[in-house]
Image: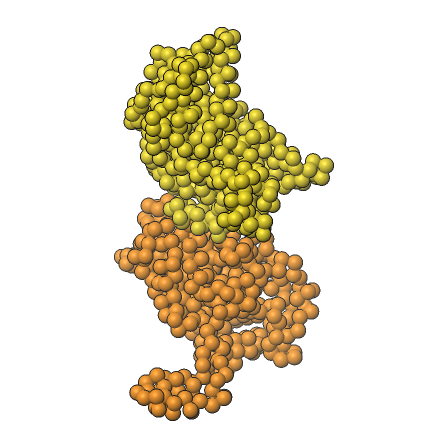
Chain colours: A yellow, B orange
Amino acid sequence: MSALEKAFYSPVGRKVAAKAGLHEPPRLRRGREFPAGAIVLAPLGTSTLVADTLALLGRAHEAPVVDSGEDAPGYGDRIGALVVDATDVRTVAELEALRAVLRPAVRGIERSGRIVVVARPATGSDWEADAVARALDGINRTVGKELRGGATANLVYAGPGVAPGDLVSTLGFLLQGRSAFVDGQTWRVAPGGAPASRLEERPLEGRICVVTGAARGIGAAIARTLARDGATIVAVDIPAAGEALAAVANEVGGTALQLDITGDDAGARIAEHVAARGARIHAMVHNAGITRDKMLVNTDAARWASVLDVNLAAEMRINAVLLDPATEGGMAADGRIVGVASTSGLAGNKGQTNYAASKAGVAGLVAAMAPDLASRGITANAVAPGFIETEMTAKIPFVQREIFRRANSLSQGGNPIDVAETIGYLCDPASQGVTGQVIRVCGQNMVGA
Amino acid sequence: MSHTVVVVGGNRIPFAKAGGPYARASNHDMLTAAIDGLVARAGLAGERLGEVAGGAVLKHPGDFNLTREAVLSSALAPETPACDLQQACATGLETTMYLANKIALGQLTNGIAAGVDSTSDAPISVSDPLRRILLKASRARSAQERIAAFAKIRPGHLAPQAPSVAEPRTGLSMGEHQALTTVRWEIDRTSQDELAAASHHRLAAAWDRGFFDDLVTPYLGVTRDAVLRPDTSVERLATLRPAFGGPDGTMTAGNSTPLSDGAAAVLLASEEWAAAHHLTPWAKVVDAEVAAVDHPGGADLLLAPVGATGRLLARQGLTVEDIDLFEIHEAFASTVLATLKAWQDPEYCASLDLDGPIGECPPEKLNVTGSSLAAGHPFAATGARIVPTLAKLLHERGPGTRGLISVCAAGGQGVVAILEAV
């Protein structure tokens, strides 16, 4: 820790910083905790989709306070969450009903509370409805930025035919602390195979999940989190990281597989390892990645190639082997492929052309794979972490790091477990209807799309 | 009563020269790391195993329960029993056979055989007279008696005594003993340097092809054997001065193993246990033989495995032609070369009561991924390094291929074992 950083975090430094407007960031609710306060349900039409989903979650709900335009009314006690069923909203005029339930809720929501809007996606057949669908996205992003105290806002587009059971894992994830660092995001849920009847505590029980780059940082957190959710972990990392990898594998009661993912036989060796256990892979989490940062004017072919090979091409080669139905120990039916993109990839980042190429490539890859794998029940998604507190980001100089940290709606860096929880949600068998999506775990970073 | 015993995996930490990167690591630390890496690879965290057998040649008095304590520090269930064994440089092979025999008898279904040694963290003891004075003082009933005891301490008593690698009965170090053997068997310098260079080149090639990805787990930041010199050559080795055998000696620091630190472990199981735990058997343990020679009476100290090899092959009805791979521990390059000469010497083999010479070992079948000259030789760990290495090599070559391990040990002893791929 530098002298400047020590001074900043000293008792005196904290007081000075607070005077300067740099307040202590809120402490986020994490884990499988639901909000403490009441869950308020606001149906903006006749749809019971969200009400029925809350019933599957076993959560009671209350009626909303509606702003009538006079003295802005408020909630007595702080509420835990506002869940809006906007699936019947089609017109610009109907958006007023959303404003009327949002206004009291934004004022009365607890710390780390949740605002979740469920709406219909654009269909391409009704100009106004499509405009309204997009308007909801704008509202969501803005509410995310206005909420304080670690509360978040997210928007879910529920496609035609979505049943409450298709939505249960998504709504459960968004209400619980697991989604702590997911803010201002929008993604789609489509009808899945067999809708779930409830939210499982250990949805991955008895399933094999392979995690690359599992020796440290975000990868180790993914291994721990998926293991907590019941998974049997195959922890993969380069041989040189074997000591830390063994410690993670032993901690989660899994197995360690020392492997360079860029090797030609990487996919085959992963499959062989799983096949020896007489199983197939439920989830393949491609977390391993490297950076070789330089401004583009200083980026040579070697820096370019190594980052693209490790972060993107290796993942594609491994997928090809594991997705071949003839591969023993390959992907199971209804399996899960999760890539790790990055907000640097989605928004671009100075000095990271190669990295941005690889990470945006991951986002493009899962979008391309998803429709082709749908018939096998296999989903392909990505998470895009923003600023996450790891050994890697701890090396960024303090002032720069503090700026990165605070440049989001939650005014803090995320923890590795925040990325891991989002991956756990995508790996949940109940998340069958979520595919081809990229979920940013960035606390609603100020940069990027 | 007889169950097939299979080698289903192994793990070691990279070996390093004494006083190197593991200078501050104890036997306990290194053995725990070797066990933990194996547990992670095989997915055995929290499991109660049948037994762990380990040992070290250089042991601190406080380490009387070294292996059991390492188990308690490891990711294995604390209900896993353990014992310490020691047979000098053959310890790691002897622990393997101890557990293999128990599994064969049905007393166990699985176990980990291991060995560890730190020449960096070797125990230093006090002289015998000082020890007697200290013991007397500790038994003293009064301050006066205690002072009287301490008064007998003389400056000469205070010199610490480092463990010696000299043979107690001859006073000769192992290198000096081997120097006699080198002369007796007319082993020339070039052959020794060639064998040493080949060991380094073969070990480096095995590392490069990823052969050790599932046999070694890095430790304290060391990711490859720190003794290994991939770029060494016969020419470069030829420039080294003799280390043993006087000014005309042919044994150098380059063709002798350095003092090393390291630990290794082998996972052994019955076929049923291996299948139930989804572990792929690499090779079965066929048989083993132990032998000794009368080195105080003038026999070659490190050639005891020759007699064991002859007797073992005869008992199994095998000849050297039936063996696909040979792993002869490279205590010194000349030990291997003298062993191979002895195998072909009718007179020497007759003196061991063998029915004729053992035969010839084709060089391309010998130590194909290098051995102790390149990897290093933490005494007790070497056998546990060789067993999984050979088992994996045989598994790569296919069912039915056989390998022979020959390890010489201090005290004029040797252990030889045969593995066969399944």
Q: Decide if residue B403 is in sight here.
A: no
Residue B256 or A374: which is nearer the viewer? Answer: A374
Which quadrant would the C terminus of chain A be assigned to in this image?
top right
x and y, in percent, of residue A446 in the image: 56, 30
Residue at left 45%, top 25%?
A154
Residue B243, given in percent of the width and then of the height, sits at 61, 75
Task: Tell me if residue A220 comes above or below residue A155 in the rendering.
Answer: below
Residue A417 in the image: above or below residue B111 = above
The number of numbered badges drawn on the structure is 0
Q: Is residue B1 visible?
A: yes
Residue appearing at x 36%, y 27% in the figure: A79
Q: Tell me which corner region of the image, top left, top right, bottom left or bottom right, holds residue A200.
A: top left
Residue B70 falls in image quadrant: bottom left
Q: Furthest residue to the front?
A: A71
Q: Nearer the viewer, residue B228 or B104?
A: B228
Residue A226's place in the image compared with B96, above or below, is above
Kindly give the residue lying farthest to the right in the view shown: A297
Q: Determine whether A140 is above or below B258 in the image.
A: above
